[in-house]
Image (tube, rainbow, N blue to C red):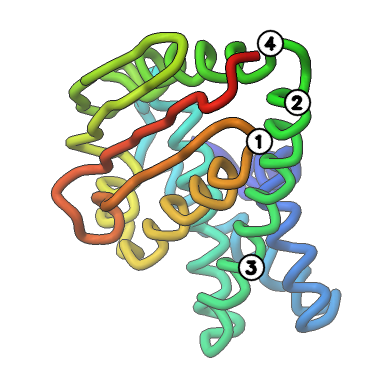
Amino acid sequence: MATVQQAKEILAQSQASGMIRDVIAERCGKTKADAVWDTAAEKLAAITEQYPDIPKGEQMHAKGIFNAAALYQALQTQIPEQAMALITEGMKRYALETAKKFQKMVRMPCGKLIFMKGFAFGAKTMFGESGGFRQQMIRADRNELRFDVLDCPYVRYLTALGCPEIAPLFCENDVYTYSNLDGIRFERSETLGQGGTKCDFHLKRIGRK
């Protein structure tokens, strides 16, 4: 459980939350952004009180989920007519910045291979059962990764917190992050967050270096 001050510090440590705040300030002014931030801290403190015992493997995901939920709920309180547009733009901005880092990686010698190995490892660990996911691994080798996510903590938590409508934003951020990397083909035809029966991830290395 976090106090409101501790919740503010948690938000401040998050680059994604900071980018959402930046978007709010740009569109609505600093005063309104500060008001949203203060309200989000209150919301986040309440959420952490509701979920005091998150399993260790889920904590990384829960932090991002709870921050986004708190900011969205604060936006609904402070600027309801712009809430979805503002959080969508902020999360997209963060995903595009993340994409730049991965793009730099895949352009390095053996970068695509390193990326594929790292993604496969993450799929089996951070995005496996210990991370709160249920999945079926179909193929994982140096050139191709294919797996289906059958149960997702992002959808579960956001639904429980009353804002399932922002779950698709996390799905869309995968597209912004991975779909334009040099030498990597990213495909997905459906996601749980967008109403599908699974998240069918498929990544393929199309270069050999």
Q: In which quarter of the image is residue 86?
A: bottom right
Q: What amino acid is labelled 4 in the image? A: Cys
Q: Does residue 117 appear left or right of residue 160 in this picture? A: right
Viewer-proximal residue, 183 or 5? 183
Residue sitting at x 37%, y 24%: 127
Q: What amino acid is labelled 3 in the image? A: Glu
* Quadrant housing the C terminus: top right
Q: Where is mark 2, residue-wise?
A: 107
Q: What amino acid is labelled 1 in the image? A: Asp
Q: Does residue 81 appear left or right of residue 209 in this picture? A: left
Q: Are marks 1 and 2 in contact (CB under 8 Å)?
A: yes
Q: Which of marks 4 and 3 is in front?
A: 4
Q: Do the residues labelled 4 and 3 touch (CB within 8 Å)?
A: no
Mark drawn on residue 182: 1
Q: Which of marks 1 and 2 is nearer the N terminus?
A: 2
Q: Nearer the viewer, mark 3 or mark 2?
A: 2
Residue 45 appears in the figure: no
Q: Where is mark 4, residue-wise?
A: 110
Q: Where is residue 98 in the image (x, y as percent from the top left)?
A: 69, 40
Viewer-proximal residue, 80 or 46? 80
Q: Nearer the viewer, mark 1 or mark 3?
A: 1
Element under label 4? loop
Q: Distance between the residues labelled 4 and 3?
A: 33 Å
Mark 4 crowd level (few <14, some 14–19, many ≥20, 10 Å Cα): few
Q: How far apart are marks 1 and 2 (CA)?
A: 7 Å
Residue sitting at x 43%, y 16%: 120
Q: Earlier in the sequence, mark 4 or mark 3?
A: 3
Q: Do the residues labelled 1 and 3 touch (CB within 8 Å)?
A: no
Q: Quadrant of residue 165?
A: bottom left
Q: How far apart are marks 1 and 3 (CA)?
A: 24 Å
